[in-house]
Amino acid sequence: MPQAIVTGTAQNWKNEVEESNVPVLVDFWASWCGPCRMVSPIIDSLSEKYSGKIKVVKVNVDENQALSQKYGIMSIPTVMLFNRGKLVDAQIGAGPMEMFEALLRSNNIPL
């Protein structure tokens, strides 16, 4: 059963990201952002492909401005990788699935 994608908010951030027992891929996006719409199905596929190995959290920057400011989001899509509650890497902009898989591998996330 694929793991559900979590909608990230300031209210659930600590539980879903900082206290997660698996690495978390966080997609900062907005509905009006064309490249975000291109990345979204890729992120969805990663969630299914690596279910149980990573968690995917999507943060709408328009609805969660405090989180966006906290992590200095200036361009979207921005995909951040958290491991053991700490930000370990980020990828700004759209790209193919392989680019996001390389982000996971380069940070020693067991896939």
Image (cartoon, rainbow, N blue to C red):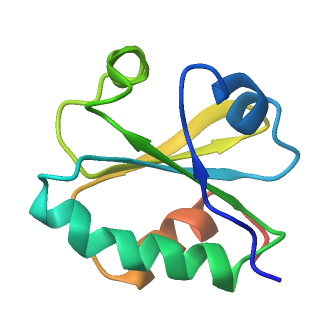
Write down the quadrant of residue 105 in the picture.
Answer: bottom right
Q: Is residue 76 above or below residue 62?
A: below
Relative to the observer, which residue lies in front, 26 or 7? 7
Q: Quadrant of the C terminus?
A: bottom right
Position of the N terminus by quadrant? bottom right
Question: In which image quadrant can residue 59 be found?
Answer: top left
- Look at 71% across and 78% down and name the residue there: 50
Residue 67 placement (x, y as % from top left): 43, 21
Whether residue 72 is situated above or below residue 88 in the rendered picture: above
Percent from the top left, x then y, of residue 64?
Answer: 38, 25
Left or right: 2 as drawn, with respect to 26 = right
Q: Position of residue 5 (x, y in %)?
A: 61, 61
**The residue positioned farthest toward the right in the image shown:** 21
Q: Look at the image and tell me whether residue 108 can be seen.
A: no
Quarter of the image where one finds residue 18: top right
From what the image shows, is residue 81 above or below residue 97? above
Residue 75 as seen in the image, left or right of residue 64: left
Q: Is residue 15 visible?
A: yes
Which residue is at a point 63% across and 20% down the rendered structure image?
A: 11
Q: Nearer the viewer, residue 101 or 5?
A: 5
Residue 93: percent from the left, percent from the top? 22, 58
Q: Is residue 37 left or right of residue 7?
A: left
At 67% from the left and 30% from the top, the residue drawn is: 86
Residue 21 in the figure: left or right of residue 28 = right
